[in-house]
Structures are given as structure tokens and as C-alpha cells.
Amino acid sequence: MQNRRMTRFPRYLLRQQVRRRPQGGAGVPSTSLHISSSARQVLFLSLFFPNQTTQQDLSSSCLSNYKDTMASSSSSFPLVGSLHALGQHVHVAEPERVEKVLTKLISGGADKLQLVVDFDNTLTRVHRDGQALDNSWGVMENSPLLPADYTGRCQALKNKYIPIEIDPHLSVEAKVPHIVEWYTKGNELLQSCKVNRNMFPDMVRASNVELREGTNGMLDKLQKASVPVLVLSAGLGDLLVEVLKQKKALSDNVKVVSNFMTFDDDGVVSGIDGEMIHTYNKNENAIHDSPYFKKIEHRHNIILLGDSEGDLHMADGVEAVEAILKVGFLNNNIEKKLGDYEKLFDVVLVDDQTMSVPSKLVDQILRDQMVANVAI
């Protein structure tokens, strides 16, 4: 019996091709892909005649359809098109609206711009060559400097509280007390393990944590243009800062808001300094009373980078927002989550381990300002 194995053309892309119709009314093209009649014929044939030639035809037809759609997008929405030119992993469900947001960001220039960025699985790379990489929690949980039972005790806390955190039937108000309890017990675990602040540099060096490719280059551009970058994280601030230091990514325009530890006279963790930062209060309201907020209160244009639904609220607290572009990194469960992410984020990056798209956005904004400065 013949093997009926289909081509390995990405299923999530095929699903996207047949799922939606153009948005925005008559005459307004969409960047959502539609499989052509010829591609549908090849797809049908491949089910019953799964020879190699048919599989190649299917991939070629789908790829041709993708290129045609991208060409249409580039001519109708050139700014969105320039992002799509970076690859098929870039998804924009509402190109007309996103084009307008990009236009506002560019016209506002560097003077109005700020970046609000999540750390774990957003600034940090998720995997390399099939190997999972540490985020800030992983740096500590996988550290050989901690007792052998530390990871198991951490996992027990996760097993108890993560189902509560992701339960769609519980309100945020109902979840918050459990999340606070989780973080409190986690901090108590650090204290019982006698974690010392002097351990953090060695923990980071012993880990495989990486920043996404191109992160340093993007941050360098932002520093030179004096554009502030607010890193918001519900993780351990002391570890985050150590990662950024060792990766040479902690410049004077980068502000980290996270859970920083307090220490006793011997340098052992003794608690959390200030209000606990968790998934549901991780936003700019946390810095309203700080000198940093005074520096950015005139910056009403925002590029937000995150990897989860909770990150969408990181810019809450910014006053008089003029333009905000929400970029979401979709790192796993792609076929299951893609449709939801396209509804939540303006730009979705599928399994992208780089900062190519955010860096492209920064280039577009800063380049227009440099041209304007030269003209003056």
C-alpha cells in the first residue's frame, strides 16, 4: 500500500491560508494567505497520489501563493510589507490598522518612543539547535550551586500554582492571592537554601541562558538615540540584571522593574524589596512614583515586546498613548495558539529566536529621524 504521507509544508501556514477572508472591506487586501485553486487541486491529489512530485508541487504552489500575497501587501501597506519581507514567520492579521500605527511611530521619531519589554522568553532565546535554553528561573533552578532537592521543591510549587494561573474559569481577582502565595513560598525556599547574592554571577556563567540574536545591536541603537527601554519581569531582578551585565546589554537607558531581593549582613536572601511584581501587576503603574517615570512621561509612542497574554498589559499606566505596537513572540504550541495570538498582538513572530523584526522597526523610526535632522 502506498505511503500517503503529506508534504512537510507547515500545517499552521496551510491552516492560515484557508481560514480567513480579507479584512477591511472591499478593495482592502489582507496579509492572511488564501490557498489558490491550483494549490487546492494539488492538495487533493496529494491525498490520493502522494508521490514526491505532487508533494513538491504543493509546496511550490503554496510558496508561490505566499509570495503573491506578500507582494500585494508590500504595495498596499509598504511598512507592513517590509516586515513580511523578513520571512514567513511574521504574521500581521490587520495590515491596514498596523500600517497606520507604524506610520505614527515613525512620524513621532525617537523623542516620543519608548520600549516596554518582557524578559523571560522575550529578551531571552528559547532554544538553539533543538536544545532548550534557560530563562531567569531556569538559571537558578538548574544551578549546581543549590541543594539537590531545590529543583524538585520548585517543581512542586509549579504543579500546584500553574493550573490556577492558567485556569480560564477564574477571575484575575481570584488568582492574585494564589500567585502572591506562590511567590512568597518561592522566596522562602531561597531563604531556606541560604542563597547568597555572591552566587548570582556564577549561576549565570554556569547556565546556557542567551539573549535573542540581535538583541545587543538593537539595544545599542536605542542607547545612541537615547530611547528608554523598560524591562518588566515577574522574575528575580537580581538575576535578570546579572544576565544583562554578562551579556553586555545593561546600558544607562535600560531600566529593570522586577522582584529584587533583600539580604542580611552575610548576603543571604532575606525577602523581597518593595511590592511584589507578578503577572497581574507587571506594568508601568509600578514606576509611577519613581524618578524614571518623570523621564518618560512625554514619550507616548510604545513598542511592546512580550510572549504571553499577561504581557499585553505591560504598558498600562502610560498616559495619553498616541501609538502602541504590540509584538508577540509565539514560542510553542504554534498551531494551537496562533489564531489567539493574532487577535491579541499586532505582529506575531512564530518561533523566531532573533530580534530581527523589532530591530527593523527601530531602524525605520530612527532612520527617518536621522534624515530629518540632516535636512534641518
Image (tube, rainbow, N blue to C red):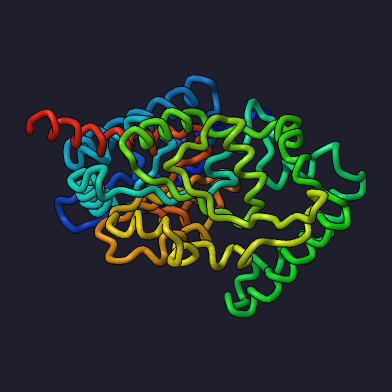
Residue 338 lies, in percent from the top left, at: 49, 50
Is residue 42 visible in the rendered structure shown here?
no
- State the residue at coordinates (85%, 36%): 144
Give the left or right position of residue 41, taking residue 79 as reference: right
Relative to the observer, which residue lies in front, 170 or 29? 170
Q: Tell me where residue 363 sits by quadrant.
A: top left
Q: Is residue 41 visible?
A: yes
- Residue 249 placement, left or right of 143: left
Name above or below for residue 183 compared with residue 236.
Answer: below
Q: Is residue 238 above or below residue 373?
A: below
Locate residue 292: give its quadrant.
bottom left
Residue depicted at x 50% and y 57%: 311
Residue 351, x across and y down, in percent: 53, 38
In front of the other: 122 or 317:
317
Left or right of 29 on screen, residue 243: right
Q: In the rendering, at what x and y percent does residue 102 appear?
A: 25, 46
Q: Quadrant of residue 315?
A: bottom left
Residue 308 position, x and y percent, is 54, 55
Rendered-image quadrant of the C terminus: top left
> Taking 246 as reference, is 249 left or right?
left
**197 vs 185: above or below:** above
The residue depicted at 82 percent of the width and 49 percent of the height is 266
Residue at (67%, 44%) from the top-left corner?
A: 239
